[in-house]
């Protein structure tokens, strides 16, 4: 594992995406990749960015 991997908390991801913590938990249920370390949830920053980009929509997509 490379030392340049950045693991984020729920709060970090919420701030990064400018959404609430609840939204992050909902996105996690919809497939946002996460890592569970004991009772702690962490997110790989690169995976979060890639997931958001791959799940983005354009106007009219519902």
Image (tube, rainbow, N blue to C red):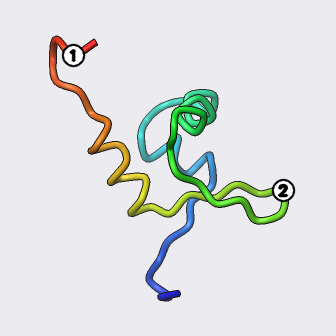
Residue 12 in the image, given as x and y percentages of width and height: 55, 51
Which residue corresponds to the image point at 21% horizontal and 16% vertical from the top-left?
Answer: 61
**Marks 1 and 2, the one that precedes in the sequence:** 2
Rounded to the nearest whole Å, what is the CA distance between mark 1 and mark 2?
36 Å
Give the label on residue 22, or none: none
Per the image, the residue denoted by label 1 is: 61
- Which x, y percent locates residue 51? 37, 48
Q: Nearer the viewer, mark 1 or mark 2?
A: 1
In the rendered image of this protein, does residue 48 appear above or below residue 3?
A: above
Under circle 1, the secondary element is loop
Q: Is residue 52 left or right of residue 23?
A: left
Residue 60 versus residue 10 in the image, above or below: above
* Label drawn at residue 39: 2
Quadrant where the image shows the C terminus: top left
Q: Find numbered disc 2 in the image and state the secondary structure of the residue it sits on.
A: loop
x and y, in percent, of residue 2 in the image: 47, 88
Residue ID at (62%, 47%)? 10
Is the residue 17 above or below the residue 50 in the image? above
Mark 2 neighbour class, 10 Å CA radius: few under 14, some 14 to 19, many 20 or more:
few
Quadrant in the picture for residue 59 = top left
Where 30 sits versus 59, above or below?
below
Residue 52 drawn at (x, y percent): 35, 43
């Amino acid at each position: 594992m490379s030392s340049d991997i950045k693991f984020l908390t729920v709060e970090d991801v919420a701030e990064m995406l400018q959404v609430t913590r609840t939204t992050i938990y909902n996105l996690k249920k919809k497939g946002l990749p996460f890592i569970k370390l004991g009772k702690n949830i962490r997110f790989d920053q690169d995976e979060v960015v890639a997931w958001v980009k791959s799940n983005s929509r354009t106007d009219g997509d519902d």
